[in-house]
Amino acid sequence: MVTKKTQSRTAKNTRTRVTHEFPALFDANSEVLLLGSIPSPKSREQGFYYGHPQNRFWKVLASVLSEPLPATIDEKKTMLLKHHIALWDVLDSCTIIGASDTSIEDVVPNDIASLITKTKIKRIFCTGATAHKLYEKYCEKATGMKAVKLPSTSPANCAVKFETLVEAYEDIRRKDATT
């Protein structure tokens, strides 16, 4: 007998082709680019980045930028653009199991080099080891820019304390930081 719990577990373990469904957030004045790997199921459901309620990304950024925690997508966009931060993902599409970055296969990268030409981006940061590895493999040569690997804010990385995340992410607001 298949129960709802079994169906849910099975759905979470199914490899799915995922395509990035919302655009990069940037404007001509963007100076820093933050890159994730690919939107999680919760982010795709919301239609914006870092949508899982337990992901600490928005709390960390608000703390680093000395801003109130943004509640809406518009508030999140406003906060980032105010601080000249662009946000995107390394991948346009891939196959993945649930939200497990370690299961990513069959990737198609985003054209990050093209985005950079439309901005003042001088520094790139990846929000986790998988995003960093994917950036190095698929995008670094085209952009000619190294990326800094930041710790993931994902609920799966809960062993890293909030204070440690804030300290690591402080680099994004330093104008003199080099990558």
Image: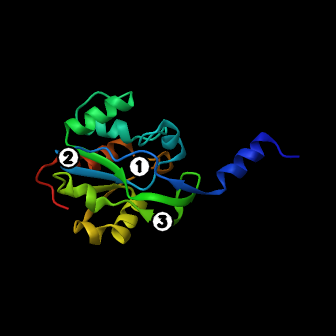
Cβ atoms at labels 1 and 3 below 8 Å apart: no
Mark 1 surroundings: few (<14), some (14-19) or many (≥20) residues within 10 A? some
Q: Amino acid type of disc 3?
A: Val
How many numbered circles does the render carry? Answer: 3
**Which residue lies under the disc numbered 2?**
30
For marks 2 and 3 on the same chain, the one whose residue lies earlier in the sequence:
2
For marks 1 and 3 on the same chain, the one whose residue lies earlier in the sequence:
3
The residues tagged by marks 1 and 3 sit, at their Cα atoms, a distance apart of: 28 Å
Quadrant including the C terminus: bottom left
- Is 23 in front, or is 2? 23
Q: Amino acid type of disc 2?
A: Ser
Mark 3 surroundings: few (<14), some (14-19) or many (≥20) residues within 10 A? some
The residues tagged by marks 2 and 3 sit, at their Cα atoms, a distance apart of: 26 Å
The location of residue 158, given as percent across then percent down, is 47, 47
**Which residue lies under the disc numbered 1?**
160
Residue at (26%, 38%) from the top-left corner? Answer: 80
- Mark 1 vs mark 3, foreground winner is 3
- Mark 2 vs mark 1, foreground winner is 2
User: In terms of secondary structure, where does tag 1 sit?
Assistant: loop
For marks 2 and 1 on the same chain, the one whose residue lies earlier in the sequence:
2
Query: Can you see residue 109?
Result: yes
The residues tagged by marks 2 and 1 sit, at their Cα atoms, a distance apart of: 28 Å
The location of residue 81, given as percent across then percent down, is 23, 38
Q: Amino acid type of disc 1?
A: Val
**Which residue lies under the disc numbered 3?**
107
The residue sitting at the left extreme is: 176
The residue sitting at the right extreme is: 1
Is 167 left, or right, of 18 in this rendering? left
Residue at (40%, 52%) from the top-left corner? Answer: 152
Is 155 left, or right, of 167 in this rendering? right
